[in-house]
Image (cartoon, rainbow, N blue to C red):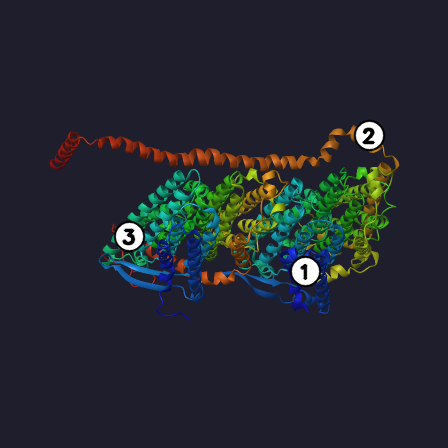
Amino acid sequence: MHIQGLPLLTIVIFFPLAGALLLLCIPKARVELLKRVALAISLIEFFVSLPLFVWFDGGVAGMQFVEQVPWIPGWGVQYAVGIDGISLLLIILTTLLTVLCILSSWRSIERMVKEYLIVFLLLETGMVGVLCALDLVLFYVFWEVSLIPMYLIIGVWGGPRKIYAAIKFFLYTMAGSVLMLVAIIAVYFLHGKATGEYTFDLLKLYQTILVPNTQYLLFAAFAVAFAIKVPMFPFHTWLPDAHVEAPTAGSVILAGILLKLGTYGFMRFAIPLFPVAAYKAIPLISVLALIGIIYGALVSMMQTDLKKLVAFSSVSHLGFVMLGMFAFTVQGVTGSVYQMLNHGVSTGALFLIVGMLYERRHTRQIADFGGLAGVMPVFATCFMIVTLSSIALPGTNGFVGEFLILLGTFKANPVYGVIGATGVILAAAYMLWMFQRVMFGPLRHEENRAIKDLNLREIVILAPLICLIVWMGVYPQFFLKKIDLSVQHFLYDVKTRYEAAIALPRVGEGALPAVGQDVGPAKPAEK
Amino acid sequence: MIDWVWLIPLFPAAGFLVNGLFGRWMNFDKRVVAWTACSALGLSFVFSVLVFFSLLQLAPEARAAVPDRVLFDWIVSGDFRAVVGYKVDPLSIIMALVVSGVSFFIHIYSVGYMHDDPGFTRYFAFLNLFVFMMLTLVLANNFLLMFVGWEGVGLCSYLLIGFWFDRDAPANAGKKAFVVNRIGDFGFLVGIFLIFAHLGTVEFTGVFAKASTLDTTTVTIITLMLFLGAAGKSAQIPLYVWLPDAMEGPTPVSSLIHAATMVTSGVYMIARCHVLYTMAPITMATVAIVGAATAIFAASMGLLQFDIKRVLAYSTISQLGYMFLAVGVGAFSAGIFHLMTHAFFKGLLFLGAGSVMHAMSGELDMRNMGGIWKRIPITFWTFVIATLAIAGIPGLAGFFSKDEILWQTYNSGHRYLWLVGAAAAGMTAFYMFRLLFVTFLGKCRASDEVKKHIHESPAIMTIPLIVLAVLSVIGGYVGIPHVLGGRNFFDEFLAPVLGGPPLGSGGHTAFSLVRPAFAAGGLAEEHGFNMEIMLMAVSVAIAVIGIGIAFYLYLWKTEVPKRLGERLKGLYRLVFNKYYVDELYEACFVTSTKRLGTFLWREFDDGVIDRSVNLVARLMLGIAGVLRRIQSGRVQGYALGIILGAVIIILFLIR
C-alpha cells in the first residue's frame, strides 16, 4: 500500500517552494494567471498530502515516511523528516487551509499580488517543514522560514498599524527563537560529550538523559520560545495586534497553523527532550493555561472589534490545548492534539467569516452590524455552525477536543479539570453575545440593508470547514484512530525517560548516556 | 423490533436535514415542508409505539435487561469509550412515547399556527432538530450521548426562543436560555468526569452495576453535580430564570419546550440515575427541598402575572418542582407519571393559549381579553379540561399524578414538604382559574378592531387540542391509586427499572434519613390507606378553595383585586416583579463579569502586560540611543576606547 522509494514528505514540503519559483517566472501584470497558478499549486499540494493520511498506519507508534540524508555530516546535521499521528493531521490541515487562504485572498489583496502569493507558498513550505523535521537544525531552519513570510504578510499587506504589529510579532517570536537556538546547541554538546556522537538527530537526542538541573534550564529556553508562539498567558499581547492588522488569510494561517507550531513544539521537542523538567512544570503550565482560558474568555467578551474578539478567544482555546497536554493522560493529550485541529478549523473559519464581513462593509466593529441574519441567511447559517463549534457544542469537533482535554485533566488533577470546565460557560457567553450583536436584532444601520449574501467562491471556501466541523464532531474515530497510538507512545516514552532520569545518581556532569536505542530504564553509567 | 429503536431519533434528524439543506428549494409549497417535518415525527411516534409493544411482550424482568443497541464507536481514547448506542427499557420507551407523541401533535398544530410566517421552513427544521435531540437524550445508553441531547435541546431552545431574531427581546431570551443552561451543563459535565474517574465507564449499565463501590461522599458530589445540570435544564431554583423569558418564542415552541421536551429532561435524568441518587441521602433531601421550594415560589410568581404565557411559564416551573419533589423523596415513578400527565395538559394549555392569541390578533395580555368563550368554543372547552387537570380535580390526569406525589411525600415522612406541596397546589388552582376566568369569561375588554376578528382556529390547530384534551382526561387512568381500588399499571411497568412501587412499603428505604421511624415503621402500613384517602380529600379541598377564591375575585367581585393590590402595595410589587431575582442576577453576575472583563482588558492587558512589553522595546531603543553616541566616527574617540580597553585587559591579567 505504501509506494516504496517515493520521498512523499520531501515532495509535500518542497512542492510549494517549487511552485513559488514557478510564480517568479510569471510576469507581475498577469494577476489573474498568477492567482490561478497559485491556487492550482496549493490544490495539488493538498491532494499530494492526502496520501499521507491514507497510507499512514495508525497501528504503528513510531515515525513514518522517514527520510534521512546527511546534510552537514561534519556537524552531525541531517536532512531527517518523518511524521507520526501528532503531526500528520496538522500537515493536512496546513495544506487545506493554504488552499482556502489563497481563495479568500482572491479579491481582498490588490497590491503586489505576485509577491503575496510567493510569500504564502514559502510560508507553507516552512510550516510543513517544521511539522516534519526530525533534526533540530532542520527544524530551526524551517521555524525561521515560517517566521519571515508571516512578518511580511502582516507588514506589507496589513492594516493601518501594520508596522507596529509586524515588528512586535517578529521581535517577540525572535526573542524566543534565539533562546531556543542556544538550548539546541547546548543539547547538541551535552549529548556529544556524553556519547561521543555529535548529532542533531532528534530521535537520538531523545535517548540522552540529562540530569534534572540541566533539564530545567534547557526546558525553560524551549518553553519560552514555544509559549510565545502558542501564545500562553502572559506572552499573548502580540497576538491581538498581529491579528487585527494582518490580512484575512494571514490571520487564518496565523491562528490555524502558526500558533499550533508552538503547541506542537512542546509535544515534539520541549517535553520529550526534557521530561523531568516537563513534569516539574506541570503546575506552572497548567495554571498559566487555566488563566489563559478564563482570562482570554473574559477579555474576549468585552471586545468591540470582531477580529480582536476572535484573537482573544484563541488565547482561551490554546489554553485548553496546553492544559490537556500537561495532564499527561491519554485523554488529555489526545484531546490536546484534536483541539489543535479544531482550533485551526473553527478559528480559521471565524477569521474567514470576519474577513467576508470586512470586505462588504470595511469595518470590523461589532457596533456597526446587527440584524444581518435577515439579509444574509446563508452567511448566518455558516456563521452559526462555526460559532457552535467554537463553543464546543456536542456534535461539533470542538466538543470532542474539549471534552477529552477536560476529562484527561480531571483524571490527573480534578481541580484543574473543574476550573477548566468553567471556560465552557464563558465561551458560550462571549460567542453567543457577539453572534447576537452582529446577526440578530433589528437592522440598525441602513448601509447593512443592501449587504450581499455569500457568493459561490465564499461558499466554496467555507463548505470544507463546515463539513469538517460536523465530520470531526460526529465521527471523530476516523481521525482519533490515527492519533491514538502516537499519543500513547509519546506518553510511555516521556514517562519511562522521566523515571530513568530521576533514578540517575546526582553528578555534576551535564549528561549521562542511556544505553541502547530502545526506550527503557537507563543504566546509570559510570564516569 | 426493539433493534429498530435507532430509527426513532433518526426520522426527525432526517427531517431536519432535508428541510435544513433543501428547504430553500422546497418552500415553493409550504405543504412539502410541513409534510416532511410532520411525517418524520409521525414515523418516529409509530416506531416508538412498535418498540413499546415489543417490549410489552417480554416478561417484566426481561424488559429492563434488553441489550443496548450500539451503532458505532463515537469517542474512544485510551480506556475511555463512548458509543452511539440506544437503550430500550420501560423508562426510556415511556419517555420516547411521550416526546414523540406530544411533539407530533405540536408539529401538526404548528402547520396552522406558523402558516404565514416567512421563516416557515427554518421553523420546522429547528423543530425536528429539537425532537431529535430530545429523543437522543432519552434513548441514549450512556452519559455522554445523553449529554449530546442535553446540550442539543439547549441549542434548539436557543434557536427557537430566538426564532424571531430581528427583535431584541427574543434574541436576548434565547441567549439567556443557552447561557443559563450551560451553567447547568457544567455541573453535568463534572458529574460525568467524576463518574468516569471513579468507575471507568460512562455507560448506564456499567455505571449502575458498579455504583455500589462508590463511597457516600463521592456519590453525593456526583449526584449534586448532575442535579445542577437538572436544575438548569428543568428550570429549578436557582437556574429557573431563563424559562419565563423563553416565552418570546412562538407559542407552539413554548408548548414543546415546556410540555414534552427539554424541561422534563432533568426529571428523567434523575430517574435514570436513581441507583446513584438513592445512595446519596443528602442529595435526595436537596432535590426534594429544591423541588418543593420551586413549586411554591414559582406558583406565587404566577399569581399576579397578566401575560397568559407567563402565567403558564411559572406554572411549568412550579409543576416541575413537584416532579423534583417526587424524585427527591424517592418516588421516581410518581415523578415520571406526573411528567407524562403534565406533558398532556401543559402542552394543551400552551397550544390553547396560542389559539387564543391566534383569535385575538396576537394579544397576550389577559386584561385585554374576556368574554370570548363563545366565539372560540373548542379552544375554551379544551382549555377548561386542561385547567381542571392541572388544578388536580378528581377524575382528570393531573389529579392522579399530583396526588401520588403528595401522598408519597407525606408517606415518606416529609410532612412539611407535603404542606408546601399542598399549598402550592392551592395556588395553582387559583392562578389557573384566574387565567381561565379573566381570559374567557366576563366582559370583553378587547378593542373593537380585535373583537371583529375573533375567530376559532382552523381544524389543523383544534384537532391537536382535542387529542391532548382527551389525553388529559384519560391519561391518569394508567396509574390509579390502589386505595381507590385501581391498579397502578404505570408503576408496575416502570418497576423493573425503578424498583418496586414504594407505595405501602413506607417510602423508599434509602431515604429514611429524615424520619427513619416513620418511614420504616408499620405506622404508615396500618393507617396508610385511611391516611391516603384523607390527604386526597384535603388536597382536593385546597384546590377547590383556590378555585373559589379565583371565582370570588375575578368573576364575582372584580373590583376587589385592585383594592387588595393597593392596600398591599409593597408585597404586590415584589411578587409582580418576580421578587427582583432577574435584577439581582443581572447585578451580581452579568454586570460584574462584564466589568471584570473590561478591567482585565483595559487595565491589565493593555495597562500592565502590553505596557511592559513596549517598555522593554523602548528601553532597548534608549540603550541603543546612548550606545550610538559612542559610534561617533571620530578616530580620537575610538583610539581612546582602544587604549582604555587595553589598560583594563592588562590590569585584569596582571592582577
- Count how many numbered circles sit on residues in the image: 3
Taking the image as shown, residue B566 lies to the left or right of residue A424, namely right
Q: Examine the rendering and report whether any part of residue A280 can be seen.
A: yes
State the image coordinates of residue A251 (x, y, percent, origin top left). Answer: 45, 47
Q: Determine which residue is flagged by label 3.
A: A187
Note whether B108 is above or below A246 in the view shown: below
Q: Determine which residue is flagged by label 1.
A: B92
Q: Determine which residue is flagged by label 2.
A: B563
Q: Amino acid at mark 2?
A: Arg
Label 3 close to label 2 by CB (< 8 Å): no
Q: A388 or B436, which is in the foreground?
A: A388
Cα–Cα gap, marks 2 and 1: 51 Å
Q: Of the numbered discs in the image, which one, if any, rests on residue A304?
A: none
State the image coordinates of residue B1 (x, y, percent, origin top left). Answer: 68, 69
Instruction: Kindly identify the residue that appears in the image at 27 percent across and 30 percent down.
Output: B626
State the image coordinates of residue B428 (x, y, percent, origin top left). Answer: 78, 43
Are the residues under badges 1 and 3 in a single subunit?
Answer: no
Mark 3 Cα-neighbour bin, 10 Å: few <14, some 14–19, many ≥20: many
Cα–Cα gap, marks 1 and 3: 60 Å
Note whether B177 is above or below A56 in the view shown: above
Q: Of helix, strand and loop, which one carries label 1?
A: helix
Q: Of helix, strand and loop, which one carries label 3?
A: helix
Q: Chain of mark 2?
A: B
